[in-house]
């Protein structure tokens, strides 16, 4: 009885009335919050919309996610719809091509096994590129879908040369295998950029729910097309490229809407360039449409034309090493200014903050060299280094307040050094 009384005392409940809905809330003894709808006088369409949001959007939406999530989700849904539709057409083509082969059923089965083996080879090759995917998840996500569409396109074309069924299907699955690994590897950093309240699991679950829903819808549309417009090869040659264009366009728009908040060479250069020009620090949402998704390694003049990750022996001549070590004796980076760009090399344990310090020095050196005469690179680097030290603490604080993660610098497979 005493235990029952204690549990009763721990149960706290109340009733809330809002938007024509009456809900009963209660804290269970284990700390969980249970909600029960007592009365709902809203129109049916409002209840349907709320039910959809609860099933396919994170709890607390839109306040629990970062800017851009709705646009990302809209294009993600259309992307999965077009991809699933195209997949049905490619599977139909493969089956048609396999049926035309003048071989026994056993040989066809072996061909399918070998074809799937090529997909596993593609997965193994792409798995070695994980560090680069961390650095440029948007670029690799687009690359994954381009690869996937190339593989699917080969499958669609397979009935045109049934005698090469195994070769074409194998090559198609090789491309799709690489695409699957790249798409899965980049999924986590993309979802993480939207997580605002530590709700990564909820974001992931709801995102996969939307993908599943529109994959099913896309499969239905693909079956309809396969039995009507695309029942002939001519129909596939018209509809297939159109679906692929829609697919790639949607992926590009998804990535443009994603405010990735980790530091890589391109995002760091954009942050520093904006700060040097305007004195303001851009947020991840501000920079998302400035990123070049196809050529992320471009040099940005206002950020010092910095190249990062080149091998130490290619960057610093032995005769210059003592001079640079003296300037940056307390740092975990070295800068070497050239005629066309500035090389930055990082120590093995350098963080995002170290890379930021180096980038700011390079940017200040570039701006100071425009308007002043310096006898040597060493003197301009020394003055730029002192200027960086004078502003770095407030700069870093505001950067972190904007939502940037400064604990790591994702430079892909860039070379680092250790003394």
Image: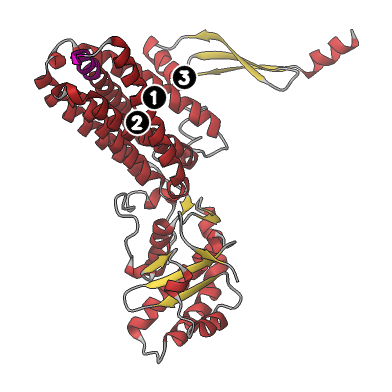
Type of colouring: secondary structure
The answer to whether residue 329 is seen in the rendering is yes
Q: Which residues are magenta?
A: 92-102
The circle drawn on residue 55 is 3
Measure how far apart labels 3 and 2 are at the Cα level: 16 Å
Q: Secondary structure at mark 1?
A: helix
Q: Is residue 323 left or right of residue 1?
A: left
Label 3 Cα crowd, 10 Å radius (few <14 / some 14-19 / many 20+): some
Q: Is residue 137 above or below residue 244?
A: below
Measure how far apart labels 3 and 1 are at the Cα level: 12 Å
Looking at the picture, tell me which residue is in the foreground, 350 or 117: 117
Looking at the picture, tell me which residue is in the foreground, 44 or 242: 242
Give the residue number, with chain letter if any, for mark 1. Answer: 211
Q: Is residue 27 above or below residue 287?
A: above
Q: Is residue 73 above or below residue 313?
A: above
Give the residue number, with chain letter if any, for mark 2. Answer: 76
Q: Which of label 3 and label 2 is nearer to you?
A: 2
- Residue at (42%, 59%) from the top-left corner? 265
Q: Secondary structure at mark 2?
A: helix
Q: Quadrant of the C terminus?
A: bottom right
Measure how far apart labels 1 and 2 are at the Cα level: 7 Å
- Residue extending farthest to the left is 234
- Residue at (58%, 68%) from the top-left corner? 418
Quadrant in the rendering for residue 73? top left
Q: Is residue 99 left or right of residue 148?
A: left
| Magenta stretch, main secondary structure class | helix
- Residue at (36%, 87%) from the top-left corner? 372
- Residue extending farthest to the right is 2
Q: Quick check: marks 1 and 2 in contact, CB under 8 Å?
A: yes
Pick whichever of labels 1 and 2 is earlier in the sequence: 2
Q: Is residue 338 left or right of residue 21?
A: left
Q: Which of label 3 and label 1 is nearer to you?
A: 1
């Amino acid at each position: 009885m005493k235990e029952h009384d204690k549990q009763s005392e721990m149960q706290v409940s109340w009733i809330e009335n809002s938007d024509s809905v009456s809900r009963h809330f209660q804290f269970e003894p284990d700390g969980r919050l249970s909600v029960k709808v007592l009365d709902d006088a809203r129109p049916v369409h409002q209840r349907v919309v709320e039910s959809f949001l609860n099933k396919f959007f994170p709890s607390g939406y839109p306040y629990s996610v970062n800017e851009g999530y709705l646009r990302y989700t809209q294009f993600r849904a259309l992307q999965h719809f077009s991809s699933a539709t195209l997949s049905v057409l490619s599977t139909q083509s493969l089956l048609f091509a396999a049926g035309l082969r003048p071989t026994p059923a056993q040989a066809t089965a072996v061909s399918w096994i070998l074809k799937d083996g090529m997909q596993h080879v593609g997965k193994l090759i792409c798995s070695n590129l994980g560090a680069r995917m961390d650095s440029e998840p948007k670029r690799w996500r687009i690359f994954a879908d381009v690869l996937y569409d190339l593989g699917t396109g080969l499958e669609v074309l397979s009935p045109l040369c049934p005698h090469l069924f195994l070769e074409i299907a194998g090559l198609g699955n090789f491309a799709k295998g690489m695409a699957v690994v790249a798409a899965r590897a980049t999924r986590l950093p993309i979802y993480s950029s939207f997580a605002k309240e530590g709700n990564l699991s909820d974001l992931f679950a709801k995102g996969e729910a939307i993908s599943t829903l529109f994959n099913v819808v896309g499969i239905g549309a693909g079956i309809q097309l396969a039995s009507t417009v695309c029942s002939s090869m001519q129909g596939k040659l018209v509809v297939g490229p159109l679906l692929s264009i829609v697919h790639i366009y949607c992926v590009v728009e998804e990535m443009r809407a994603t405010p990735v908040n980790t530091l890589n060479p391109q995002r760091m250069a954009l942050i520093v360039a904006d700060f040097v020009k305007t004195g303001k620090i851009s947020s991840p949402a501000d920079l998302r449409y400035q990123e070049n998704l196809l050529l992320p390694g471009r040099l940005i003049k206002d950020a010092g034309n910095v190249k990062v990750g080149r091998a130490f022996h290619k960057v610093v001549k032995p005769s210059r090493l003592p001079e640079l070590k003296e300037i940056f004796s307390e740092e975990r980076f070295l800068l070497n200014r050239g005629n066309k760009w500035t090389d930055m090399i990082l120590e093995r344990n350098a963080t995002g903050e170290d890379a930021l310090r180096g980038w700011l020095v390079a940017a200040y050196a570039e701006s100071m060299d425009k308007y002043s005469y310096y006898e040597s690179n060493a003197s301009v680097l020394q003055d730029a280094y002192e200027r960086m030290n004078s502003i770095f603490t407030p700069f870093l604080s505001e950067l972190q307040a904007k939502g940037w993660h400064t604990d790591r610098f994702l430079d892909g497979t860039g070379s680092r050094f250790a003394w």
